[in-house]
Image: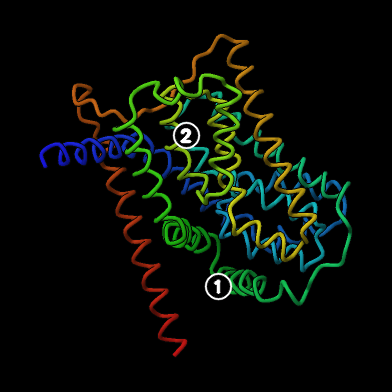
């Protein structure tokens, strides 16, 4: 019993340490996400990408990198893009770059990992998204947007955006910023809270229970590590921000930075929800191109990042979540970690309230 309590204590301590290191930057990232929400309306994105050209693929990848949407949140946007006439390539590109990166996940990467990884992650997300979109334009079959099929999902995006525009237009810039802050620290946490908490808790479990270099000793080949983490990340759903502490811990345990990057690229973009939407709105051929491109680029990106570290003689740095009391009390980390947990709890409360209301309304 005593050993079990000790294990739980170690897991919670490691989880809390990771939260303390990441929370200040993550909260800053959510704030940046609110600014993106305030000044880049969804309807403007739809208009910009509603062209059947390679330029629309480029802009879809570029806009998706900082945009604060996980793969669940990007689904209505993707459906709206397709309904408005965006090419399959632009939609594929947008659906990849948006969940793979974001202002919040970039901030979390900077907090928990080193600068090369922080820079490489959004670049790799853009490259993967652009390659997938270009491959779709080259290899895919052109077809008209499935208006009827997309209408249900896209209506949610349109109605939310129209409501937002009507509400914000007469009230001016301060009200727009306030509304976007409520979105970032309310609705975003409602969608992501469970994944964030599970992601950090899983990272705490790995940090507390897996001995240093345990994984690296069993996967001594850097290439094998990359392939293994792509296979691990591809079938599961993990949002970009929640994947970051997991990637940081496996790097701290001896996994190569390229393998961690491959996991960060494959995990958020290849879950069942995204693949189902792409198959429904773009077709099986497009979904196959999408999945193959992500896997190939994740492996290539991982190999490239490892080569970069080796060429410069760099050693990857990452937070391992091994609590060290001798380092002193971190007031900023503790306060922001507590605020982050409270925001997650509030997000879970909003989620439960929303589901309860939908059940009552459906009766």
Give the alpha-carbon distance from disc 1 to disc 2, as whole Å.
Answer: 40 Å
At a point 74% along the width and 55% down the height, the residue shown is: 91
Query: In the depicted view, which residue is nearer to us: 119 or 269?
Result: 269
Residue 59: mark in rendering:
none
Q: Is residue 155 left or right of residue 29?
A: right
Rendered location of residue 42, percent (x, y):
65, 61
Rendered location of residue 68, percent (x, y):
55, 51
Binning the other alpha carbons within 10 Å of mark 1 as few (below 14), some (14 to 19) or many (20 upward) gives some
Binning the other alpha carbons within 10 Å of mark 2 as few (below 14), some (14 to 19) or many (20 upward) gives many
Q: Is tag 1's residue or tag 2's residue first in the polypeptide sequence? A: 1
Q: Secondary structure at mark 1?
A: helix
At a point 42% along the width and 74% down the height, the residue shown is: 355
Q: Secondary structure at mark 2?
A: helix
Q: Is residue 26 left or right of residue 99?
A: left
Q: In the rendered view of the protein, which quadrant contains the N terminus?
A: top left
Q: Is residue 118 left or right of residue 320?
A: right
Rendered location of residue 85, percent (x, y):
82, 64
Rendered location of residue 98, percent (x, y):
62, 49
Q: Is residue 118 above or below residue 199?
A: above
Image-quadrant location for residue 14: top left
**Front of the two marks 1 and 2:** 2
Residues at discs 1 and 2 in contact (Cβ within 8 Å):
no
Q: Is residue 93 above or below residue 207?
A: below
Residue farthest to the front, as pictured: 218
At a point 67% along the width and 71% down the height, the residue shown is: 154
Which residue bears the numbered disc 2? Answer: 247
Q: Looking at the image, what colour scheme do you see?
A: rainbow
Which residue bears the numbered disc 1? Answer: 167
Q: In the rendered view of the protein, which quadrant contains the C terminus?
A: bottom left
């Amino acid at each position: 019993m005593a050993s079990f309590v000790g294990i739980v204590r170690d897991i919670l301590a490691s989880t809390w340490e990771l939260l303390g290191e990441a929370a200040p930057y993550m909260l800053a990232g959510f704030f940046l996400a609110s600014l993106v929400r305030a000044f880049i309306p969804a309807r403007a994105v739809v208009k910009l990408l509603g062209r059947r050209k390679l330029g629309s693929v480029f802009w879809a990848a570029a806009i998706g990198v900082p945009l604060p949407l996980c793969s669940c949140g990007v689904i209505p946007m993707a459906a709206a893009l397709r309904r408005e006439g965006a090419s399959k390539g632009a939609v594929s590109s947008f659906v990849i770059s948006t969940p793979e990166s974001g202002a919040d996940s970039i901030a979390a990467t900077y907090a928990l990992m080193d600068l090369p990884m922080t820079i490489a992650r959004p670049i790799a997300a853009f490259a993967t998204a652009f390659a997938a979109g270009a491959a779709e334009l080259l290899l895919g079959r052109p077809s008209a947007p499935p208006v009827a099929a997309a209408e249900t999902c896209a209506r949610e995006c349109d109605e939310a955006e129209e409501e937002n525009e009507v509400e914000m237009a007469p009230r001016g810039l301060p009200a727009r910023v306030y509304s976007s802050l409520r979105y970032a620290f309310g609705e975003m946490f409602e969608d992501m809270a469970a994944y964030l908490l599970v992601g950090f808790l899983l990272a705490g479990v790995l940090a507390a229970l897996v001995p240093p270099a345990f994984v690296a000793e069993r996967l001594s080949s850097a290439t094998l590590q990359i392939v293994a983490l792509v296979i691990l990340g591809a079938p599961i759903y993990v949002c970009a921000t929640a994947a970051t502490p997991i990637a940081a811990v496996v790097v701290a345990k001896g996994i190569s930075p390229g393998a961690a990057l491959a996991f960060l690229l494959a995990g958020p973009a290849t879950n069942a929800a995204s693949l189902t939407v792409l198959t429904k709105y773009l077709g099986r051929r497009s979904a196959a191109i999408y999945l193959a491109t992500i896997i190939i680029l994740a492996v290539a990106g991982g190999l490239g990042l490892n080569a970069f570290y080796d060429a410069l003689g760099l050693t990857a740095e990452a937070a391992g979540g091994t609590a060290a009391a001798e380092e002193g009390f971190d007031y900023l980390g503790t306060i922001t970690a507590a605020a982050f947990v409270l925001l997650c709890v509030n997000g879970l409360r909003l989620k439960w309230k929303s589901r309860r209301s939908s059940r009552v309304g459906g009766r």
